[in-house]
Amino acid sequence: MEAYKQEFIEFMVESDVLKFGEFTLKSGRKSPFFMNAGAYVTGSQLKKLGEYYAKAIHNTYGDEFDVLFGPAYKGIPISVVTAIAYSELYGKEVRYCSDRKEEKDHGADKGSFLGSKLKDGDRVVMIEDVTTSGKSMEETVPKVKNAANVEIVGLMVSLNRMEVGKDGEKSALDEIQEKYGFKANAIVSMADVVEHLYNKDCNGKIVIDDEIKTAIDKYYEQYGAK
């Protein structure tokens, strides 16, 4: 596993973004882990977050794209900090764009989007925190496609939860790739997280001990993607 991925896993735990215990998800599933990107709140955390996304996008998709699109709401700051990091790390200027939940009907920037306007020929990388069901892509992809004649290069999320999506077989990322025809990837997967943290010290404590590991294994027996 690349060093930046190991660092990112520890960064999520240290930032209180990735937690272990018992959590009820929006889907109703009882999960032994939970990720909340809203817990990145300081300048240094957001700077690092952008750098990890930029490295993952660079390594996965290369630099042949023009726009980072972050769906509202959590995708907005992620797309902004990643665009900044891309400029600093790779010397490439990429634009950011996000959608509005409610269309703005006044001012010079009225419309359905924040940031850069999408233009014909733009190559777009979608960027999100985590995808469990793929519902956000159902709402976002048509907006992006209807705004201009663009090419969606791929999607990058923080964590691949590796659990079944809507069809009950494939993961949400695999479903997105199959449905929309663009690649869907994550900085790290839960398999990476378990590999790196199981019975290992992280920030002065063991966050995945035998009990948590057993709970994760049982969760995947029920909800793990094939």
Image (cartoon, grey):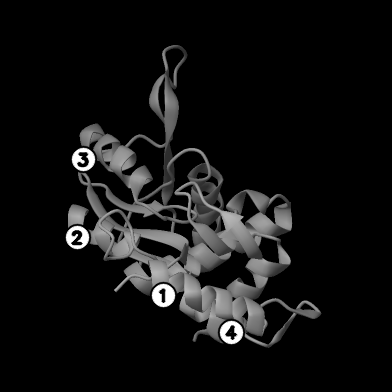
**Mark carried by residue 221:** 1
Q: Which residue is mark 3?
A: 120
Distance, label 1 to label 2, CA atoms, is: 23 Å
Answer with left or right where residue 139 lies relative to residue 145.
Answer: right
According to the picture, the residue beneath numbered tag 4 turns out to be 196
Q: Give the residue type at disc 2.
A: Glu
Q: Position of residue 80 (x, y in %)?
A: 53, 47
Q: Amino acid at mark 1?
A: Glu
Q: CB under 8 Å between callouts 4 and 1?
A: no
- Tag nearer the camera, 3 or 2: 2
Marks 2 & 4, CB-CB < 8 Å contact: no
Work out whether mark 4 precedes mark 3 in sequence or the reverse, and give the earlier one. Answer: 3
| Rendered view: 11 above or below 134 | below
Circle 1 packing at 10 Å, graded few (<14), some (14-19), many (20+), is: few
The one of 196 and 141 positioned closer to us in this rendering: 196
Residue depicted at 42% across the width and 55% down the height: 131
Front residue (pair 220, 14): 220
Instruction: Give the mark nearest the N terminus, 3 or 2.
Output: 3
Sequence-first disc among 4 and 1: 4
Contact, mark 3 vs mark 2 (Cβ under 8 Å): no
Which tag, 1 or 3, sits closer to the chain's start?
A: 3
Residue 75, x across and y down, in percent:
49, 46
Instruction: Please give the name of the residue rendered at 70% of the width and 76% of the height, measured from the top-left corner.
Output: 207
Camera-side mark, 4 or 3: 4
Measured Cα–Cα span from mark 3 to mark 2: 24 Å
Q: CA distance from mark 1 to mark 3?
A: 45 Å
Mark 1 lies on a secondary structure that is: helix
Residue position for label 2: 178
- Nearest the viewer among 222 and 143 is 222
Q: Secondary structure at mark 4?
A: helix
